[in-house]
């Protein structure tokens, strides 16, 4: 069990924590700055090391007007056996006017007999920018056989806040339930075992960008599709979904896409999140 609250504000050209709170098995490491842009990076830590049955983790993140945050994790999120129950993470994100958030956690690893639900509720401003990457990986046994997790349910609900109120921009609902006999068989994830996702919400998202990200992804050994969402109050959503048999290949692919956006939109170098 764990609870974490983090509010980021812009102060004198730098993004800093205006509020921090944690309880239970969630906390953040001290902030650090990856470049001279003023963007702050926080690392979420789970000292317990894994999610277990009936565990509930609640995260509340706010990036205020003009502030910029990279949020990552110290290591992979491991979901162990959850007999008769499931582990759950609930995350609420709010982005202010001109705010930027890059959400780049390490992979989720679901082990044998694991059930996991992840609900992320996001509210953006029409002038804010969201880039959210994620990789789902099955756990492996010592003999090389894949563990059979029960199911993963991941739901991203994205709203746009404006003077007219808050309206739903996109609902990304994903259910992964491996067949009993073969976690990577044909008919299930096209024979692949790993899933990568990139969600981008920004006023600069358009069909040309979707095509370019697809070309970037095509240079990697993965099966990828890109979907362009609706435009609301001038802001548009995009989802890239990629299948592979390798966490490293998906991280490279998503990192390449994120690097393109960082350079083009903010003049920043690729993320370097070395954690060792």
Image (tube, rainbow, N blue to C red):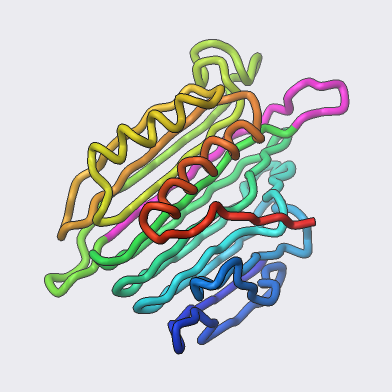
* Rendered residue at 56%/15% (across/down): 191
Residue 162 part of the magenta segment: no
* Rendered residue at 70%/49% (across/down): 76
Q: How far across and down, in percent of the image, does residue 75 sit?
A: 72, 53
Is residue 22 shown left or right of residue 177?
Answer: right
Quadrant hosting residue 130: bottom left
Query: Is 4 located above or below residue 224 in the figure?
Result: below
* Rendered residue at 63%/55% (across/down): 272
Of the 4 image quadrants, the one containing the N terminus is bottom right
Q: How far across and down, in percent of the image, does residue 193 sit?
A: 61, 24
Residue farthest along the right direction in this orientation: 142
* Rendered residue at 49%/62% (across/down): 91
Q: How far across and down, in percent of the image, does residue 93 sit?
A: 42, 66
Of the 4 image quadrants, the one containing the C terminus is bottom right
Is residue 126 shown left or right of residue 18?
Answer: left
Residue farthest along the top direction in this orientation: 186
Residue sitting nearer the eye, 132 or 33: 33
Residue sitting nearer the eye, 60 or 262: 262
Q: How far across and down, in percent of the image, does residue 118 sit?
A: 52, 50
Query: Is 260 located above or below residue 224 in the figure?
Result: below
Which span is picked out in magenta? 140-159
């Amino acid at each position: 069990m764990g609870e974490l609250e983090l509010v980021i504000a812009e102060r004198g050209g730098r993004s800093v924590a205006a509020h921090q709170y944690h309880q239970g098995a969630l906390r953040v490491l001290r902030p650090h700055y990856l470049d001279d842009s003023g963007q702050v990076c926080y690392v979420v830590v789970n000292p317990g090391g894994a999610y277990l049955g009936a565990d509930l983790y609640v995260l509340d993140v706010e990036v205020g007007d003009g502030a910029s945050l990279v949020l990552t994790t110290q290591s992979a999120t491991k979901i162990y056996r959850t007999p008769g129950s499931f582990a759950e993470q609930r995350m609420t994100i709010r982005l202010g006017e001109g705010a930027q958030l890059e959400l780049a956690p390490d992979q989720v690893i679901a082990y044998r007999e694991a059930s996991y639900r992840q609900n992320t509720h996001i509210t953006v401003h029409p002038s804010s920018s969201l880039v959210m990457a994620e990789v789902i990986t099955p756990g492996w046994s010592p003999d090389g056989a894949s563990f059979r997790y029960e199911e993963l349910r991941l739901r991203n609900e994205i709203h746009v806040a404006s003077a007219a109120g808050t309206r739903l921009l996109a609902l990304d609902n994903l259910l992964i339930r491996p067949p009993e006999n073969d976690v990577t068989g044909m008919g299930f994830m096209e024979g692949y075992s790993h899933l990568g996702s990139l969600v981008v919400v920004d006023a600069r998202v358009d069909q040309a960008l979707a095509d370019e990200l697809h070309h970037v992804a095509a240079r990697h050994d993965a099966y990828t599709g890109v979907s362009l969402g609706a435009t609301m109050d001038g802001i548009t959503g995009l989802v890239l979904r990629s299948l592979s048999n390798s966490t490293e290949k998906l991280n490279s692919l998503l990192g390449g896409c994120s690097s393109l956006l960082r350079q083009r939109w903010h003049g920043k170098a690729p993320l370097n999140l070395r954690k060792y």
